[in-house]
Amino acid sequence: MSLNQQKNNDKINKETDKIPFSFFVWYNTYAIAMNNREPGQDRNVAALSELFMCGGFNFMNNDEYFMKIALKNAAKAASFDEVPVGAVIVKEGKIISQGYNKREAKQSVFSHAEIEAIKKANKKLNSWRLEDCTIYVTLEPCIMCSGAIIQSRFKKIVFGALDPKGGAIVSSINVLEAKNINWKPEIVYGVLQEECSEILKKYFKTKRIWWKTWITKFSVILYYQYEF
């Protein structure tokens, strides 16, 4: 092998080292699927099927995965005519509690999704300290919930939609900027933001339509009652 060829090989090896290992797994799975396809089956269809089966397309990160579950809790809240907010608490990659908004059902200002989930986590771990836990919430926590999250010593807060009026971490105020605060968890926001915002928009749109329909019917009744 000549000196130039050796230099070229070294350069190729250095560039190859920069490629993530996951790419090689993905590529090899694709290649195997191309060879193992059924007779007459389109090779791209076969490859995609194999990739999905083997987890080759694992684009959803952990934050998105757990936020999806929080969204399911938000949907459950909407089914009970509650403002659709959901929360999930995770420790060491496992869900230890879930909660959704129950303020109307319990007629309690404390029954936000975060508080419901925190209470369950406290009971499960038999501790008020949630230092090794991450809480996922579909909507930016309010002042009350932000305080509870700080007091619980959460390691990380992840939320989806911003709350311009009531958000107490990014939007309206930031409680973590309070002077001499003794606990500051990591903050991640904007995870599945569109989905988290959309479920709220649909809920309030439905409520507005219901009110408009009710007011229209009531107006018609009054009109005919006093007209004739």
Image (spheres, rainbow, N blue to C red):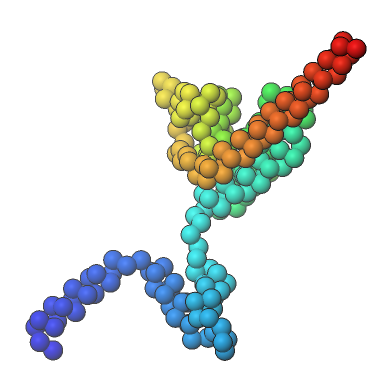
Q: In the rendered view, tell whether residue 176 sits above or below residue 46.
A: above
Give 79 or 226, whichever is nearer the viewer.
226
In the rendered image, the residue lying farthest to the top is 226
Q: In the rendered view, tell whether residue 141 sits above or below residue 136.
A: above
Give 136 or 154, whichever is nearer the viewer.
136
Residue for point 50% across, 65% down? 57
Q: Describe residue 144's horizontal placement relative to residue 190 as left or right.
A: right
Query: Where residue 97 sits: x, y (%)?
Result: 66, 44
Locate residue 148: give its quadrant: top right
Q: In the rendered view, tell whether residue 51 sits above or below residue 107.
A: below
Query: Where residue 94 sits: x, y (%)?
Result: 60, 53
Image quadrant in which the C terminus is located: top right
Asked if residue 28 can be seen in this view, the reply is yes
Residue for point 86% across, 11% down? 227
In the rendered image, the residue lying farthest to the front is 228
Query: Where residue 99 sits: x, y (%)?
Result: 68, 40
Residue for point 76% across, 27% down? 213
Give 212 or 75, whichever is nearer the viewer.
212
* Count of numbered badges drawn on the protein: 0
Query: Where residue 116 sits: x, y (%)?
Result: 68, 35
Q: Describe residue 216's horizontal placement relative to residue 66 as left or right.
A: right
Asked if residue 104 can be seen in this view, the reply is no
